[in-house]
Image: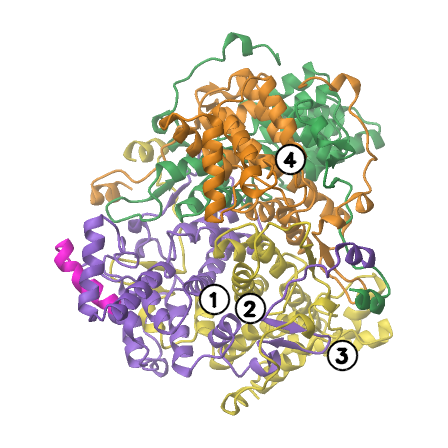
Chain colours: A green, B orange, C purple, D yellow
Amino acid sequence: MDSRATRAGRQPFHWQTAIGYKTRDKIVVRGYDLNALAGNVSFPEMAYLVWRGELPPAPHGRMLDAILVSMAEHAFSPSSAASRLVTSGGVPLHVGVAGGLLALGSLHGTADRPAALFKDAAARMKRENLTPDEIGRRVAGEARRAGQRLPGFHHPQHIRDPRTARLLELSDAWEISGAHVAVARAIEAATEEFWGRRIYLNGPGAVGAICADMGFDSELIKGIFLLSRTVSLVAHTYEEAHRERGWRGSEHTPVVQPLDLSLQGPEFYDGPPDRTLPRDRRGGGE
Amino acid sequence: MDSRATRAGRQPFHWQTAIGYKTRDKIVVRGYDLNALAGNVSFPEMAYLVWRGELPPAPHGRMLDAILVSMAEHAFSPSSAASRLVTSGGVPLHVGVAGGLLALGSLHGTADRPAALFKDAAARMKRENLTPDEIGRRVAGEARRAGQRLPGFHHPQHIRDPRTARLLELSDAWEISGAHVAVARAIEAATEEFWGRRIYLNGPGAVGAICADMGFDSELIKGIFLLSRTVSLVAHTYEEAHRERGWRGSEHTPVVQPLDLSLQGPEFYDGPPDRTLPRDRRGGGE
Amino acid sequence: MDSRATRAGRQPFHWQTAIGYKTRDKIVVRGYDLNALAGNVSFPEMAYLVWRGELPPAPHGRMLDAILVSMAEHAFSPSSAASRLVTSGGVPLHVGVAGGLLALGSLHGTADRPAALFKDAAARMKRENLTPDEIGRRVAGEARRAGQRLPGFHHPQHIRDPRTARLLELSDAWEISGAHVAVARAIEAATEEFWGRRIYLNGPGAVGAICADMGFDSELIKGIFLLSRTVSLVAHTYEEAHRERGWRGSEHTPVVQPLDLSLQGPEFYDGPPDRTLPRDRRGGGE
Amino acid sequence: MDSRATRAGRQPFHWQTAIGYKTRDKIVVRGYDLNALAGNVSFPEMAYLVWRGELPPAPHGRMLDAILVSMAEHAFSPSSAASRLVTSGGVPLHVGVAGGLLALGSLHGTADRPAALFKDAAARMKRENLTPDEIGRRVAGEARRAGQRLPGFHHPQHIRDPRTARLLELSDAWEISGAHVAVARAIEAATEEFWGRRIYLNGPGAVGAICADMGFDSELIKGIFLLSRTVSLVAHTYEEAHRERGWRGSEHTPVVQPLDLSLQGPEFYDGPPDRTLPRDRRGGGE
């Protein structure tokens, strides 16, 4: 190494990081001893710290927690189906999970894209001194005239995504909703004028708006989705490995992989029947 | 499809799942409406529910939370380095994260393997009516004589992994520690006799023992590690993408990727200086 | 670096490799200048050289070429379906290809497993001084009694895999077939006695036997399959990206992904009609 | 399924493909029986057929063969290093290979990007009725003024990539070089005027120009690179698994992963010494 350093006249490359470091005796994350964090901060707060460098304000930690819960499972989709197909080839758990993650591209799990839209719109609202309604009408109208979809709006399976109302309710209750949520709502309202029917803000759209109000960079909003959906991919990979036979489909057991919503309903579900949360669980976030 | 169904004389394959289902109007996970969960259960509790079908007892939820925090970041390792190298090739965030996840194989992030060891040992302890000390001495002695490593013991970088004591402290305080933690401790104690020095239970080993006492299947313990470490992989991928130049290493900027512990110490860290948790954060788990 | 080297008393780790090296002026692979190889050796010969360190005898190069062609495309399977699902999430080409590769685990594309079986059997035949027929009957009989499948035998979709006869024909013509092919044939013949019907050697089984006769390590036989099938995964990823709409399946366009053989027949194929090779292409290998 | 089809009023989604199909008795690829292809067409010709639907003219088949050889191995890079790091975590061969493939993003293995540049330039040359020299000066001058790099030019490790001359020599000899190669050469020549020194066409740049002259879509040119480099990734994954110890780096064996060119030279290579091709191999392509 000496000769090399001499030859090049400078130190070899090393990664420089602001995330953390470890020594023989401790692990330090963003300045905090890891052992002081474990047991004292929640896992969502830990993610916030690792990603952004500071612990979140308490309402932001709770909101991030609720978002991670809300996006954690959505039955069959390209990612869970990819995890299952990869798993059917005979692989360890972590490979099935990674296979599913690969599907979370620019068309799947895209809370980052509506966040970018709402950030642009909120900045323009401020710059041009507009009201939310005014910017909402401009954004919706311009998209309609250009024949473009609005990222974060419409859900082909739900039409009106049930997750949206719940997330916005929490965001309002915890006083997180700000300019980005306002813009998102205004765009939704304005769709009626330009499409002739309401195009609803979907779950990832709500996540994008709320996380923008929490100051998240758009790429890290994608990271939130990846972390959340990893829960689902572990479950689908595990279930596939334990319940299905692996890849030896035969003439006698046709293998048609159903991604159709109509094949994902209660008739193909055999888990616990519908039930309500224990009383002591309810109301925490309401 | 009619003709096909007729031809084959049976229904086409579809995945049957116990995880959840969705309809136009709701998303149901293990029987619960997703909207009732968001805001009312923590993300670790949600993972427990999605994976195991039931919400955890409160101490188990808190313990899982602490474990997820404790394994979430460990500076440079094959997985974070793989994420960074993949990212240097010019890929979206989710691809860098998946690239790192692929490295979490049988030699990296292996809380599942010590869990399997402790489960075998605890079952044998019961079957043969032994005390923890007796089974600990048998397991350690047999491994030593066979020239085998004990999964979950020793950490090459820390020697005595700092995470272990903290995790066991919480597990004891929350009355989770049972037969598997007892066996793990007994094996550690017995190493002194057979190796001539103490071989310490490491962090993943502690996770394996505690999760076994919480009734987790070994494969799902791997899932816990995958979920936890996804936090780190998002951070390293994001930092690499924003801080490094991508793959155009040149003669003039030698690229030596440092995985040596000595290159991971404070001298290459430029995040916040060491600091303590705000007072109102401390004591929660202690 | 000086202080570090001093502190540790030894050189930092570096990968040592026997595959090749590069300098400012040349790229050397297994001792050969890359530019002397390009245009003078075929791509299958290059793969053989990179993997095994020497150029193959000419018949081995041709046989490897034929094997790579024979395994390059097999319509829908877990790997091509995984590539398509990953692609439907909106990712670059190389990510779709990698997603499909992940599915090529221990149950898919497994020429390495029959190779291991034939190597064990051939070694035992020699050790115990048996004829191929004798070892074939022992292997088949033992598997049947133990209730085990024989890796490399039976194809659920073809029953009698059409690729097998062609590959063995070439292997015989080019005088490659040796002890491993003999054992594979003998095991197939013996299945009639123990199963009451012939269980045919399948395509990957033939690949395993022939490659074992060419002296390939079993793991590299898996490498052959990975290289070959990459052709298919590029094609399916590319077709999916250009032909399908991406992940926005709707109520109005049900998405059922068909892996059933009956959905892979001519009625869902719209490429060129069946045709024969130009005359000047025929006979090369026959 | 009947009820579902009825409910929706149309057939369920299925993938429609022009690549091939299989029945119980045969496998058909782009209209040809797979068995007629094996032994009669080369693997590069097969890739061409699977990707583009037709067998290539003979010189195109040979050129594609030479390109696949030329890009098959390039010592350490983000992709081979990622394969090795993933492998060090303890995974099967195909997972190490896929991990390396993930790194082949927009900054690594990018013959597709220069191809796009040359296609644009060639189209403009024709449209504006320019000579190659004229379009070369315009493209180089515009890039220089805009402060942009030219994709396919300059190689940080080689400066003048040794592969370029060999590939262009073959492309000329086989009369493949056309407008795109002419444009690539003209741009290179024009760099002297605008940068004050010659910026050389690199290997992937040459591949891009030649493949454009063979009529390849840019994305499929990326596919060529992926197929070629899979050879390398299998070799590095295999060598890592058999030669290194896996992820248990210790205080006593510092792990510095060297990607510096100076650590990739002959002093860290222990394969066969430099040698020349056997006489009967030489001249084939020269």
User: Which one is nearer the viewer's eye here, C8 or B272?
Assistant: C8
To which residue does mark 1 refer?
A: D52
| Rendered position, C27 above or below A205 | below
Residue extending farthest to the top is A279
Q: Which residue is labeled 4 in the image?
A: B72
Which class describes the residues within 10 Å of circle 1: few (<14), some (14-19), or many (20+)? some
- Give the x, y percent position of residue D59: 51, 81
The span shown in magenta is: C183-197
Three-letter residue code for mark 4: Ala
Residue at left 20%, top 58%?
C140
Pick whichever of labels 3 and 1 is earlier in the sequence: 1
Relative depth, front residue between D160 and D20: D160
In the rendering, which numbered label is found on residue D216?
2
- Secondary structure beneath dot 4 equals loop
Confirm whether residue C242 shows in the render.
Answer: no
Asked whether residue D194 appears in the rendered view, the answer is yes
Q: Same chain for labels 3 and 2? Say yes or no.
A: yes
Q: Amino acid at mark 3?
A: Asp
Residue at label 3?
Answer: D133
Q: Please, what secondary structure does the residue beneath circle 2 have? A: loop
Q: Chain of mark 1?
A: D
Crowding at dot 4, Cα within 10 Å, few <14 / some 14-19 / many 20+, comes out as many
Please identify the dominant SS of the magenta region.
helix
Provide the chain ID for the residue under circle 3. Answer: D
